[in-house]
Image: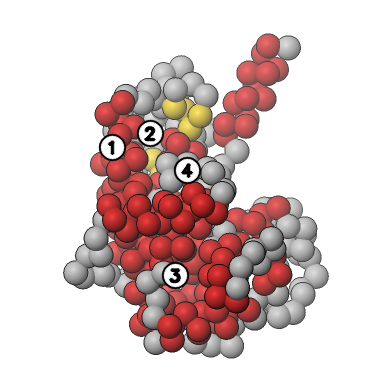
């Protein structure tokens, strides 16, 4: 029984998760929305209203029309993850994928689970690096931005809100290859953005970073955190609107700040152990990335939907 439990726990640890906790997405969206001009706000509000799941975005929201529009935007930011458990949609990345019926106006019912990240590989112990798989956040973000003004603007906007946030979680921008994590054929295997790096024996590196912005869904917390991030991090004078820059930065930050361990650390036998210094620094980095994500999101929306 104990052995079975160990395996079950291990499998739960392995289940790849690819996202800030929904709370992280909402905090970034709240901070971004509050920086938009009245004109841009009106345009994004209009696009969100056209989304077929608008009723879900506003479920339980109390307040006047302005507050409702704001919370619809905030809730829409987690839609990319919400549909992972939605039977109208199917996981197109599975080999046995069974397409579900297309429900207009959705262009397709794919969950696009590979849009949330990009595996820019690195190896601390000299493993030969394969090319990054496509599609990925890197190939799709430019299409989402370009699509804002088109017929499917509502679709592209809601994906952009999500994936722009995702790539500011550093572990969405890289994956580690070492001679200590091997696939069935004995070749070095991707650690799936830190999902397979064991931390403190009970969690993994990706989840640790996903949860750094908090896991409290309370609206008061989301607003408080959005304000706090704005105070902690002033708007930079220059804001890059190029997703390639966001991703390159994210990979570098992940390698310097998240994977601060030798190649052999992060296995079941030899888990990575967080120190108080690591905890403090990772928290500071997550705040900095989230604030930057919000400033950049607001800047992209303001430039495309003036
Ligand atoms: Zn995601």
> Can you say which quadrant of the picture contains the N terminus?
top right
Which image quadrant is residue 75 in?
bottom right
Cα separation between marks 3 and 1: 27 Å
Q: Camera-side residue: 162 or 194?
A: 162
Cα separation between marks 1 and 4: 15 Å
> Is residue 229 placed above or below 277 in the rendered structure?
below
Front: mark 4 or 2: 4
Residue 178 is marked as 2
Residue 180: x, y in percent? 41, 27
Q: Cβ–Cβ below 8 Å for labels 4 and 2?
A: no
> Can you say which quadrant of the picture contains the C terminus?
bottom left
Which residue is most to the top?
2
Q: What residue is disc 1 on?
A: 281
> Is residue 247 placed above or below 52 in the rendered structure?
above
Q: How busy is the neighbourhood of tag 4: few (under 14 within 10 Å), some, or many (20 plus)? A: some
Which comes before the other along the chain, label 3 or label 4? 3
Q: How busy is the neighbourhood of tag 1: few (under 14 within 10 Å), some, or many (20 plus)? A: some
Cα separation between marks 3 and 2: 41 Å
Which colour assignment does the render follow? secondary structure
Cα separation between marks 1 and 2: 24 Å
Which comes before the other along the chain, label 3 or label 1? 3
Which comes before the other along the chain, label 1 or label 2? 2
Which comes before the other along the chain, label 4 or label 2? 2
Q: What residue is disc 3 on?
A: 33
Residue 163: x, y in percent? 48, 62
Front: mark 3 or 1: 3
- Visible residue check, residue 36: yes
Residue 214 is marked as 4
Residue 95 horizontal side relative to residue 166, left or right: right
Which comes before the other along the chain, label 3 or label 2? 3
Cα separation between marks 4 and 2: 30 Å
């Amino acid at each position: 029984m104990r052995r079975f439990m160990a395996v079950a726990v291990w499998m739960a640890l392995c289940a790849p998760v690819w996202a800030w906790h929904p709370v992280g997405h909402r905090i970034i969206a709240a901070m971004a929305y509050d920086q938009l001009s009245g004109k841009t706000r009106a345009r994004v509000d209009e696009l969100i209203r056209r989304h077929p799941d608008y009723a879900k975005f506003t479920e339980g929201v109390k307040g006047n029309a302005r507050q409702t529009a704001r919370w619809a935007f905030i809730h829409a930011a987690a839609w990319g993850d919400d549909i992972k458990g939605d039977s109208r949609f199917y996981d197109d990345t599975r080999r046995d994928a069974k397409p579900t019926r297309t429900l207009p106006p959705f262009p397709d019912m794919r969950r696009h689970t590979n849009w949330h990240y990009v595996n820019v590989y690195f190896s601390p112990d000299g493993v030969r690096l394969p090319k990054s798989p496509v599609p990925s956040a890197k190939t799709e973000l430019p299409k989402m931005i370009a699509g804002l003004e088109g017929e499917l603007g509502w679709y592209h906007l809601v994906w952009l809100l999500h994936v722009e946030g995702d790539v500011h979680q550093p572990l969405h921008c890289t994956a580690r290859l070492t001679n200590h994590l091997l696939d069935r054929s004995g070749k070095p295997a991707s650690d799936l953005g830190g999902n397979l790096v064991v931390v403190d024996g009970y969690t993994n590196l990706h989840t640790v970073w996903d949860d750094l912005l908090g896991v409290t869904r309370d609206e008061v917390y989301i607003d408080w955190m959005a304000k706090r991030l704005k105070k902690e991090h002033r708007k930079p004078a220059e804001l890059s609107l190029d997703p390639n820059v966001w991703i390159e930065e994210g990979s570098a930050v992940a390698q310097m700040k998240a994977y601060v361990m030798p190649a052999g650390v992060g296995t079941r036998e030899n888990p990575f152990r967080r120190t108080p210094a690591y905890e403090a620094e990772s928290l500071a980095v997550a705040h900095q990335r989230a604030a930057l994500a919000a400033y950049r999101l607001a800047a992209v929306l303001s430039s495309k939907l003036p």
